[in-house]
Amino acid sequence: MTSLLLTGISELLTNDPIHDGTPIGLLEDAALVIEGRKVAWAGPRLQAPTADAVRDLGGRAVIPGFVDSHSHLVFAGERSAEFAARMAGESYAAGGIRTTVAATRAATDEQLLANVSRLAAEMRRQGTTTLEIKSGYGLSALDEARSLVIAGQFTDETTFLGAHVVPPEYAEDPAGYVDLVTGPMLDAAAPHARWIDVFCERGAFDEDQARRILLAGRGRGLLGRLHANQLGPGPGVRLACELGLAAVDHCTFLDDADVAALASSGTVATLLPGVEFSTRSPYPDARGLLDAGVTVALASDCNPGSCYTSSMPFCVALAVREMRMTPAEAVWAATAGGARALLRDDVGVLAPGKRAHLTVLEAPSYVHLAYRPGVPLVAEVIA
Ligand code: NIG
Ligand code: FE
């Protein structure tokens, strides 16, 4: 196995506290050795071991590749008219999902594949090296299964979201739809998914339905995660903590009991500030969650309705400017936090034995991700 020494790193954010006693494990004037697919060494440049090859990164900052733990990339069409109407004063409603369901059902496999490919490449250019992709715009056994097969061509982190909304043909029989999701649709989806998710929200699925669907998935070996408390207060966050799910996503409308439940559980709160930006809604109280000791992740939620950004740097900038996270907290949440939300210990950290997924910034410091919003700062992705 050949080794590569990367040197000339102005700032190396490792997420390994061993270096500076803080969660982001920051090193200045650093170097890193890659062997095969893994990090072999990280530390001060002057202590770097020799390697088969050397590359000088010219004083750029390096962070772990972003871990985007929440996206909905398998869809057809777009909803810019809905966005424009929202900016003119209309409010976001879960019903818009059905527009994308119709377009997705009508699309060919090739069209869906091309769209995921385009968006995954967009993410990669913006520094994302691990991503999760959900189904949820098929809502039939066949369309959910094919969505997951397509997602699986881009990531192992595939999520079955048959319980996104009740599709029109079941409008009069939501209980029948839950039977479908927990029966034949789960049979078709489970072989192609690692995770199961439910949109637990007024207008989508209630607490009892969500519990039933998550437990059915668990019975088929799927791990649970949840969309909850996005559009208003509700039972979803507490349900996620009760079931010990890896993550509960959105967390926009929380009360004290929700925050206490998160703080005393291992469940990660994944915040998706691109949604609040794109729906002109109040942001989640990231500061309150962090101060209560909750583990916070940041993800894009890239989807054609509530948030059509694929940019983790944009989410970091929003988290800092709008949610009062420090740049260090935000970059940790977008890397190590995302890894926790996906129960992954091989990514999100640049330490010996971890995957060599590096995002090189056209900047001397990781702080520039928030300090220079909207600027394409990713110089190179090494993965
Ligand atoms: O995470 N909340 C539910 N699902 C997506 C939105 C999907 C859509 O509007 O198409 C979300 O925001
Ligand atoms: Fe989502």
Image (cartoon, grey):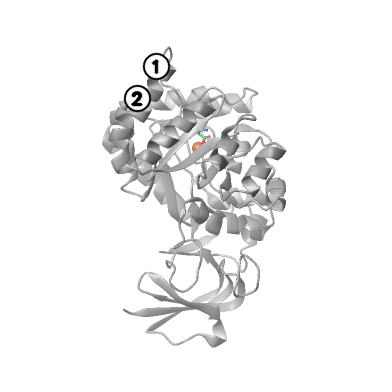
The residue positioned 43% from the left and 72% from the top of the image is: 353
Task: Report the disc number at residue 180.
Answer: 2
Task: Report the disc number at residue 178.
Answer: none
In the rendered image, which residue does mark 1 sit on? Answer: 170
Q: Badges 1 and 2: C-beta atoms under 8 Å apart?
A: yes
Marked residue nearer the N-terminal end (1 or 2): 1
Question: From the Cβ of disc 1, is ligand 1 less than 8 Å away?
Answer: no
SS under mark 2: helix
Residue 172 occupies which quadrant of the picture? top left
**Towards the viewer: 35 or 80:** 35
Q: x, y percentage for residue 218?
A: 40, 40
SS under mark 1: helix
Image height of 292 relative to 55, above or below: above
Residue 357 occupies which quadrant of the picture? bottom left
Tell me: 255 left or right of 1. Answer: right
| Residue 135 seen by the camera | no
| Residue 176 seen by the camera | yes
